[in-house]
Image (cartoon, rainbow, N blue to C red):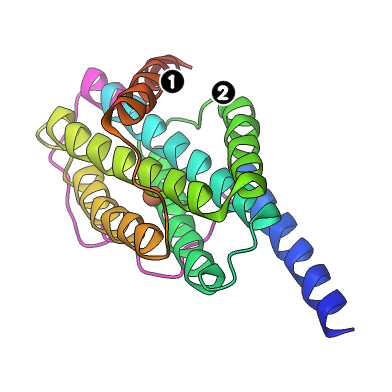
Amino acid sequence: MDRLQSRSDRAIHQFDTFLRTFMPHAATSQRANPADNAVDSALDDQERRHAASLMRVNHTGEVCAQALYQGQSATAKLPLARKQMDHSALQELDHLAWCDERLTQLQSRTSYLNPLIYLASFGIGASTGVISDRISLGIVAAVQEELGRQRDVHQKALPSGDHRSRVILRQMAVDEAHHAHLALEAGGVRFPAPVKWGMRLVSKVMSKGVYHL
Ligand SMILES: [Fe+2]
């Protein structure tokens, strides 16, 4: 009975997270937005559009991370790491909410490609969870490392006056490095460099599409 209850609880939790990931402005953060006290310099129209496009890419990265965690949670056994991974996924929801909020402030929107990217990422999380918890955790770690690398690139690419976006990305990078470490510590496989290069290439192609769409 407890087990049934626990499974139904998880299914409800998954559905709730799915809705929060997809519904505009539905994601809420548990922590305060790190940009609450930051003040922007004036951005002209071109700078605002560029910043919004970069933040759209970052938001989609969070959709990808949520889908991976949800796919992993649906199939992986994770006897020792489930609580820790659930906690990481919850912190990643903060990132989704912060990016969403920033996109609204920049008078922009989330990507039209999000449903496609969500489905692909959920599929990867779920299928690797079926194969092996270690591979599933390794994918989570590699994706978090790649997202962290992308945050660093975007911090430099943002208009110099966009302090709010920069503060958000800085906190996200700190969290993501921690989440990658936790996934590896929980037994995740460390993938060889060619696999990571392949992931980086996919990420770059995806980012280019999301920047415009
Ligand atoms: Fe994140």
**Residue sitting at x 36%, y 28%:** 195
36 magenta-colored = yes
Q: Which residues are magenta?
A: 24-49
Callouts 1 and 2 close, C-beta under 8 Å: yes
**Badge 2 element:** loop
Q: Residue type at mark 2?
A: Leu
Closest to the observer, 195 or 54: 195
Tell me if 58 is positioned left or right of 25 in this view. Answer: left
Q: Nearer the viewer, residue 104 or 5?
A: 5
Q: Earlier in the sequence, mark 1 or mark 2?
A: 2
Going 59% across and 71% down the picture, which residue do you hit? 79
Residue 65: in magenta span: no
Quarter of the view holding residue 200: top left
The answer to which quarter of the image holds residue 4 is bottom right
Q: Residues within 10 Å of mark 1 (few under 14, many from 20)?
A: some
The foreground one among 160 and 177 is 177
Local secondary structure at mark 1: helix
Residue 23 visible from this viewpoint: no
Say which quarter of the image contains residue 76. Answer: bottom right
Residue furthest right in the image: 1
Q: Which mark is residue 158?
A: none
Vertical placement of residue 141 versus 41, above or below: below
What kind of secondary structure does the magenta stretch mostly adopt? Answer: loop
Residue 185 locus on image (x, y percent): 35, 64
Give the residue type that dot 1 points to: Met
Of 128 and 114, which appears nearest the observer?
Answer: 128
Furthest residue to the left?
160
Left-right relation of 187 to 194: right
Q: Which residue is mark 1?
A: 206
Residue at image mark 2? 113
- The yes-or-no answer for disc 2 within 8 Å of ligand 1 is no
